[in-house]
Amino acid sequence: MNIIQYQALTLPADFYELLKMHAKDYQTQEARFITLNFADPDYNAERGGFHPVEIGLSRQGDAWALSYFTDFAFYGRVMPELEREIDVHFQAQEVYSTFYGTRPLREVAGLVQLLLKNFLSYVAIDAYVVKVQAH
């Protein structure tokens, strides 16, 4: 599986390897998009846990490109709902955060690198159950 290296920001090699490992069996000829969901089965609004993450890959010719990386969290006190907390749109080079809205990726590159570093450390301790879908 060939994943196009993102040019606007250096991303960890381990991140690309993780994507390849989980998505390789889903890159059929018909597939145009692959969604990877990483979920902590014990995560809930009361006790917390590891935030769920969704990653999207879109087909570009014979390769795949990063589309988005979304980190979700519970918000609300009485009836908490799972909402996006940080949403990285790689192709648009924008990042949304509940704390500051939408910003150009270049302005918040450090946040994105920290987000990916933390995500990879949670993967390394088997915090997530992974589900993959091809569309």
Image (spheres, rainbow, N blue to C red):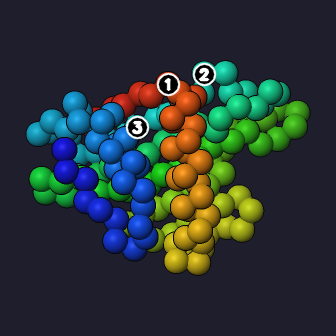
Give residue 36's mark: 3
Report how far apart the C-alphas of labels 3 and 2 lie in the structure. 15 Å
Q: Which residue, as the protein is rendered here, is positioned at the far right?
A: 78
Q: Is residue 1 visible?
A: yes
> Residue 67's spot in the image, x, y percent?
38, 56
Asked whether, in this view, residue 40 is left or right of residue 4, the answer is right
Give residue 129's mark: 1
Q: Check contact, mark 1 vs mark 2: CB within 8 A.
A: yes
- Residue type indicated by callout 2: Pro
Give SS at disc 1: strand
Residue in the picture at 53% in, 27% down: 126
- Residue type indicated by callout 3: Leu
Which of disc 3 and disc 1 is earlier in sequence? 3
Q: Check contact, mark 1 vs mark 3: CB within 8 A.
A: no
Asked whether, in this view, residue 22 is left or right of residue 48, the answer is left
Binning the other alpha carbons within 10 Å of mark 2 as few (below 14), some (14 to 19) or many (20 upward) gives: few
Residue in the picture at 34% in, 65% down: 6
Report how far apart the C-alphas of labels 1 and 2 lie in the structure. 7 Å
Residue in the picture at 73% in, 27% down: 44
Comparing marks 1 and 3, which lies closer to the viewer? 1
User: The N terminus appears in which quarter of the rendering?
Assistant: top left
Report how far apart the C-alphas of labels 1 and 3 lie in the structure. 10 Å
Q: For mark 2, what is the residue?
A: 41
Which of disc 2 and disc 3 is earlier in sequence? 3
User: The C terminus appears in which quarter of the rendering?
Assistant: top left
Residue in the picture at 23% in, 36% down: 24
Q: Is residue 96 above or below residue 72?
A: below
